[in-house]
Amino acid sequence: MTTLTLSAGLPERFKDAEFEAGSPAPVVERLPISVEHMSVEKMDDHQLLAATLAGDEAAFPELVRRYRNQITNYVYRMLNDYDRAVDLAQETFVRVYMSAERYQATYSFSTYIYRIAHNLAISELRQRKRHRLIPLPTIFSEKDGDEMEVEIEDRKQVMADDAMISDERRRAVAKAIASLPEKYRAALVLCDLEEKSYEEISEVLGLPVGTVKSRINRARNLLKEKLRDYL
């Protein structure tokens, strides 16, 4: 199991936080939450940020523990690249920590951290597009002519084994999701895999709820087309 240790250069109380394998929020006043005599396990997310600012060495590692798997999974589903997802999950927590004094309390912490992770994932996807030199039409191309690029892999004979078939389907689903246009992919992953509400997705993506619903519906239809051989 992959674990991460946060980068050097951070305060000592943050370096020891480990977790498995974005734009900063506007400046606001520090949350007026008293956390002096509470254990970190009993604090909510807002209180943990306040405790972090107050110098509680156990507060931020608790936030990492609560969200490490969720954030890593979300980024992985956006990129279909586990190693890079682990890197960006770490970067997400670094940004949260470094911007703790500017945390915007009008959003839930979950929305806030997912928005940072989403922005990092989108930046990574756009950077990849800039480095692609040869477009390859594939079965994952959209009907309107927008072609997606994928790596060419050697095709192996599929064994008639239940576990093998299940694994093949899992890879096909992951590849199909990764081939969706960014705007549809994010909405679908947040809704169907991360189980976020329409309102939460609206806040993460900065879109009206109606637009979110439309993108989710479009993404599901695209996914059905891409996976028709497995349904």
Image (cartoon, rainbow, N blue to C red):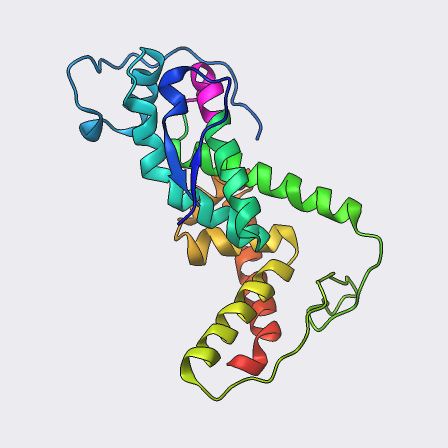
- Res 227 quadrant in image: bottom right
**Residue 168 point in image, percent of width and height:** 52, 75
Give above or below for 138 relative to 75: below
Q: In this figure, what is the number of numbered marks?
A: 0
**The stretch drawn in magenta includes residue 124:** no
Give above or below for 67 relative to 139: above
| Residue at the (28%, 15%) spot, across then down | 56
**Residue 61 point in image, percent of width and height:** 33, 28
Residue farthest bottom in this picture: 160
Q: Which residues are magenta?
A: 96-105
**Residue 207 point in image, percent of width and height:** 56, 41
Residue farthest right in this picture: 133
Give above or below for 85 relative to 157: above
Which residue occupies the foreground of this view, 186 or 197? 186
Residue farthest left in this picture: 37
| Residue at the (64%, 61%) spot, across then down | 179
| Residue at the (36%, 29%) spot, across then down | 17
Q: Is residue 108 visible?
A: no
- Res 31 quadrant in image: top left
The overriding secondary structure of the stretch rendered in magenta is helix
**Residue 32 point in image, percent of width and height:** 29, 12
Q: Is residue 193 visible?
A: yes
Which residue occupies the foreground of this view, 185 or 12? 12
Which residue occupies the foreground of this view, 55 or 106? 55
| Residue at the (54%, 48%) spot, across then down | 83
